[in-house]
Amino acid sequence: MPEKIPEQYKDLLEGRTFAHLATIMADGSPQVTPVWCDFDGTFVIVNSAKGRLKDRNMRGNPRVALSILDPENPYRYLEIRGRVAEITEEGAEAHIHKMARKYLDVDEFPHQNPDETRVIYRIAPERFSFMG
C-alpha cells in the first residue's frame, strides 16, 4: 500500500512544478531527468515515451525517487522514494494532453511524435523527506 503524501506538500504535485525523476541504469548507476508530474491522490504519475532511457530503466528496476522543489521557495522541497506500481499505455495519449494543459496552457501536447508510443508510470510513494 502506498504511503500518503504529506498534506502540506501536495501543492508541489498539483502545481506546475517540475520533478526530477531518478531511475537506476542497468549498471546500477543513477540517471536523473526533469519531468512533468501528476498526482491522483495515491500515485505520482509520470508520462513518457516507450523506449526512452527512463522507460527502459523503470521497466528494468522499479525503484525510483522524485525531487520536487518549490519554485517560490528553494528551501522547501519534497523528496519521494518509491516503486513503479504500474506501467500502461492505456490513457497515456489523453494524459500527455492533460499535462500540456497544466504545464503549457495548450490543449494538445505540441511535441507529439507520431512514431512514439506514450506510456504512463504510476509511482507508489514509500518514503519521504522534506523541508520548509
Image (spheres, rainbow, N blue to C red):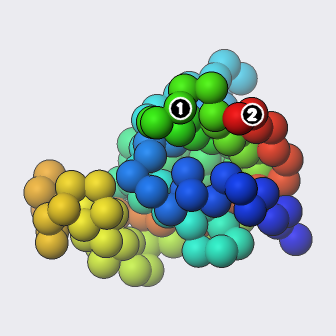
Tell me which amino acid carries mark 2.
Answer: Met
Figure check: 42 above or below 33: below
Question: Residue 41, located in which quarter of the rendered image?
Answer: bottom right
Quarter of the picture holding the C terminus: top right
Q: Position of residue 46 (x, y in %)?
A: 49, 57
Number of callouts in the render?
A: 2
Assess disc 1: are there few (<14), some (14-19) or many (≥20) residues with their C-alpha within 10 Å of its C-alpha. Answer: few
Question: Residue 61, located in which quarter of the rendered image?
Answer: top right
Q: Position of residue 10 (x, y in %)?
A: 63, 59
Q: Earlier in the sequence, mark 2 or mark 1?
A: 1
Q: Is residue 86 left or right of residue 107?
A: right
| SS for dot 1 | loop
Q: Position of residue 38 (x, y in %)?
A: 49, 63
Residue pointed to by mark 1: 73
Q: Which residue is nearer to you in this view: 99 or 131?
A: 131
Q: Which residue is nearer to you in this view: 27 or 132?
A: 132
Query: Which residue corresponds to the image point at 62% horizontal and 26% vertical from the top-left?
Result: 75
Tell me which amino acid carries mark 1.
Answer: Asn
Figure check: 118 above or below 60: below
| SS for dot 2 | strand
Q: Does residue 120 appear in the picture of this structure? A: yes
Residue pointed to by mark 2: 131
Query: Which residue corresponds to the image point at 15% horizontal and 72% vertical from the top-left?
Result: 107
